[in-house]
Amino acid sequence: MTNIEIYTDGACSGNPGPGGWAAILMCGDNYKELVGFEPQTTNNRMELLAIINGLKVLKTPCSVNLYSDSSYCVNAINQKWIDKWQSNGWRSASGAVKNQDLWNDLLTLLKTHKVTFIKVKGHSDNEYNNRCDRLAVEAIKMNT
């Protein structure tokens, strides 16, 4: 299984508002940046789309270290919130789980790839997380 490093970030100007996402994929000497934009969205959707789109471009099953500054995304997997949401019919203590469509997309991808979710501190000293943040913010600026 190929080992891949993926860094992701999402940004939103207003919440909701226009949003951007970015993912950086690295495998050996190979490096790829992905960027996207949505005209009306939320920050959490952009964080999820960065992860989903980063995983979608992988052509074969891979072992992935996925780095995100989103507690929402990382904790949903690592603390098994998503398992609880599913067993409760996509309901949490506060009501219906948002972004169910994207969570389902992510769950499908997690059946193909072995993904380890790693929380990084946002706006700190991680060069790839900072690069993803800049790319996501630039996507908003270029499209609004």
Image (cartoon, rainbow, N blue to C red):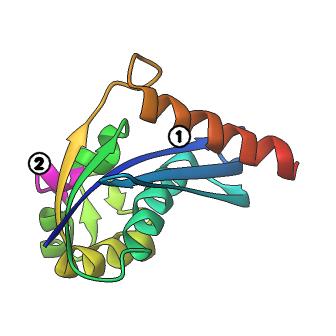
Q: Residue furthest front?
A: 29
Label 1, secondary structure: give it.
helix
Tell me which segment is drawn in magenta.
76-81
Dividing the image into 4 quarters, which one contains the N terminus? Answer: bottom left
Q: Residue 19: horizontal and vertical position, in percent?
A: 68, 50
Q: Residues within 10 Å of mark 1 (few under 14, many from 20)?
A: many
- Please tell me whether the stretch drawn in magenta is mainly helix, strand or loop: helix
Instruction: Answer with left or right where residue 134 lies relative to residue 3.
Output: right
- 118 and 6: which is toward the camera: 6
Residue located farthest toward the right when viewing the structure as drawn: 144
**Disc on res. 115:** none
> Measuring 68% from the left and 38% from the top, which residue is drawn there?
137
Q: Considering depth in this image, is 96 or 131 the residue closer to the camera?
A: 131
Q: Dot 2 lies on which element?
A: loop
User: Which of the 4 image quarters holds residue 13?
Assistant: top right
Q: What residue does disc 1 label?
A: 132
Q: Residue type at mark 1?
A: Cys
Relative image position of residue 117 (x, y in whole percent): 21, 50
**Residue at mark 2:** 79
Q: Amino acid at mark 2?
A: Gln
Quarter holding residue 100: bottom left
Rendered image quadrant of residue 112: bottom left
